[in-house]
Image (cartoon, rainbow, N blue to C red):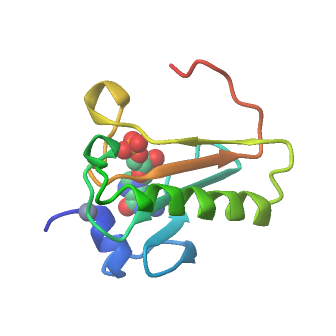
Amino acid sequence: MDCIFCKIASGEIPSTRVYEDDLCVAFKDLEPQAPVHILIIPREHIVSAAEITPGNSSIVAHIFEVAAKLAKDNRLKNGWRIVSNVGEDGGQSVKHMHFHLLGGRAMAWPPG
Ligand code: 5GP
Ligand code: ZN
């Protein structure tokens, strides 16, 4: 399958990994939007959060556990943001579900 994040998960495309386990991989975003900008992806190819079902939803809880650990590791004591863009209106550019972990600066709400 021609999916850039599947290739990052398998190691076929290099990335700066900050965490991995049997279920997910976390790596630094190529174009960071904050001092800490990590992408957390399932190893399984799931297109977006719109494809979450009772059969695969446990990966989301797992990814949030990993996000909390990474936020702690990065000393984001003042807070952080986790975002998953879905589809065209959501601004999703890579069609493999991913969660942006952003921190290290104050962030505005609502996003553009
Ligand atoms: P989206 O716009 O789909 O929510 O987020 C995709 C993110 O993936 C963007 O922030 C973009 O910078 C990042 N990205 C795209 N291609 C690569 C890549 O090859 N390596 C890394 N590390 N990040 C990538
Ligand atoms: Zn994929």
In the drawing, does residue 6 fall left or right of residue 101? Answer: left
| Residue located 49% across and 60% down the image | 40
Please tell me whether residue 89 is drawn above or below residue 49 in the rendered image: above
Q: Position of residue 35 (x, y in %)?
A: 71, 49
| Residue located 36% across and 32% down the image | 91
**Numbered label tally:** 0
| Residue located 83% across and 58% down the image | 75
Residue 64: quadrant of the picture: bottom right
Q: Is residue 29 visible?
A: no
Name the foreground residue: 54 vs 36. Answer: 54
Please tell me whether residue 102 is drawn above or below residue 21 in the rendered image: above
Quarter of the figure with the N terminus: bottom left
Q: Position of residue 29 (x, y in %)?
A: 51, 56
In the drawing, does residue 23 fall left or right of residue 104? Answer: left
Residue 28: quadrant of the picture: bottom right
Q: Position of residue 47 (x, y in %)?
A: 25, 51
Q: Position of residue 37 (x, y in %)?
A: 61, 52
Q: Which residue appears farthest toward the left when viewing the image?
A: 1
| Residue located 78% across and 42% down the image | 79
Q: Which residue appears farthest toward the front when viewing the image?
A: 54
Q: Is residue 16 visible?
A: yes
Name the foreground residue: 54 vs 74. Answer: 54
